[in-house]
Amino acid sequence: MRLSSYTALTAALGLASTADALKILMGNDDGFGSGNLRELYKLLVDAGHEVVVVAPAQQQSGKGGTVIWSETANLTIPSQYNLIPAGAPSVGRDNSSQDIWYYDGTPAACTFVALDWVLPRYYPEWKQTADLFVAGPNYGTNLGAFVMGLSGTVGATFAAISRSIPGIAISASNRAVPYFNVTGASHPAVLAAQVSFEVVNEFIENTMDGQAVLPLGYGVNVNIPTLVNGTTPPIIKTRLTGNANTDVAVYNETTGLFDWDNVDPVAAGINAAYNGDLSLPGETWVVAGGGVSVSVFTMDYTSPSNTYTELVFDKIGGLVVGEGGNGTKYSRRMVEERMRKRGAMLSGRDGGA
Ligand SMILES: *[C@@H]1O[C@H](CO)[C@@H](O)[C@H](O)[C@H]1NC(C)=O
Ligand SMILES: *[C@@H]1O[C@H](CO)[C@@H](O)[C@H](O)[C@H]1NC(C)=O
Ligand SMILES: *[C@@H]1O[C@H](CO)[C@@H](O)[C@H](O)[C@H]1NC(C)=O
Ligand SMILES: *[C@@H]1O[C@H](CO)[C@@H](O)[C@H](O)[C@H]1NC(C)=O
Ligand SMILES: *[C@@H]1O[C@H](CO)[C@@H](O)[C@H](O)[C@H]1NC(C)=O
Ligand SMILES: *[C@@H]1O[C@H](CO)[C@@H](O)[C@H](O)[C@H]1NC(C)=O
């Protein structure tokens, strides 16, 4: 995979050897007709990678990691931008490209349909996994821990990471545009894809052959500010917390309806920082300042070992039976024994289920 002698440009021109080619699964939440998605897809294909897209048949923003399957075998209404007519199967190929698929479900559902239906049936050589999952670029940024539960872009990525695939979620600041309306080299969707490619390609280039792009259970959240004049803004290492937003419910007295807004000033809870390098700037600040943020997260939500965590456990000290003494049903040793009987843990990278 190491393309050290190649620049991003030569890779973009398709000069990467097939030995360097990765199997990249893509998704998003804006829908399979997204201009951003298709532009990044083209750049990854041009760089020599095998890329399969499985993305929602309709716009599915804000669905987070929720998995909602299509309730009908065939589309009851035409897909996004009328690309697929009503009555066509709820999962299928786009007419414009063999390797771009739609599914009429949420972003995370699309990831699972990709892994458990599209890949095994149509791409058996992928062995039900991918070397890398890339979502987006989304229309609009996804900043702070709040979006870990809210964003479909992140949700689709989370689903892939949970199945042992390194995942990169990318969000940009441009507006929605169907792929067939992206014209000209300076279109915002083209620029967003170029910056996305630059970051993704850097991860790939600096991965030794045979190694995983990211450690098991790791993901990356990339956010791109509004781009001007085709120049890539500075790319900054960031953390999720720091001036990050969460919602406030806004009640309209006239309509009797609620809508959301960003809470102002920002809430302390969503910005409580415990894990990782606390000296890194928050991604929200960095993107507001015009930089590209790159945050790293893991599947493990467990709180760190510190006095706060001790304090929390201490409160139920009278109830809990400690850490489960050796030999008891709940000890780590006995639990692991039961898990072994259940079967080896699935590893997407080794061929999955
Ligand atoms: C779905 O559409 C296919 C043709 O694409 C048709 O053969 C099938 O009967 C349809 N299924 C349902 C449940 O309508
Ligand atoms: C895509 O393919 C379906 C099924 O073959 C067809 O009904 C539909 O008209 C095609 N759409 C376009 C835009 O070509
Ligand atoms: C695509 O561009 C055409 C021509 O500018 C415009 O009429 C149409 O509304 C655009 N489609 C969408 C879905 O934005
Ligand atoms: C972008 O280009 C315009 C016109 O050439 C120029 O006025 C502006 O300063 C440039 N902006 C940046 C951020 O380089
Ligand atoms: C409440 O809803 C009405 C009707 O949609 C709208 O005209 C009004 O601006 C809204 N009020 C506020 C404070 O947003
Ligand atoms: C429990 O058993 C493990 C080995 O299985 C051992 O390393 C550990 O020290 C034991 N813990 C206690 C509290 O006895």
Image (cartoon, grey):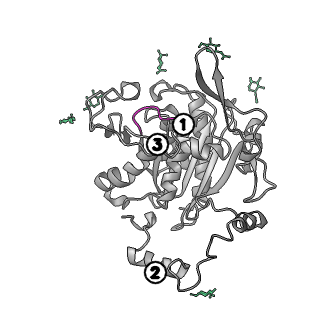
User: Could you tell which of marks 2 and 3 lies nearer the N-terminus?
Assistant: 3
Query: How far across and how far down the image is residue 310, in percent?
Result: 74, 68
- Per the image, label 1 sits on a secondary structure element best described as loop
- Residue 337, numbered label: 2
* Magenta segment: 56-62
Asked if disc 2 is less than 8 Å from ligand 6, the answer is no
**Residue at coordinates 57% horizontally, 57% vertically from top-left?**
204
Q: Residues within 10 Å of mark 3 (few under 14, many from 20)?
A: many
- Residue 62, numbered label: 1
Pick whichever, 69 or 278, lies toward us.
69
Tell me, yes or no, if residue 7 can be seen here.
no
Give the dominant element type of the magenta stretch: helix, strand or loop. Answer: loop
**Residue at coordinates 76% horizontally, 32% vertically from top-left?**
264
Q: Is residue 207 above or below residue 265?
A: below
Amino acid at circle 2 = Glu
- Whether residue 343 appears in magenta in the rendering, the answer is no
Q: Nearer the viewer, mark 1 or mark 2?
A: 2
Q: Residues within 10 Å of mark 1 (few under 14, many from 20)?
A: some
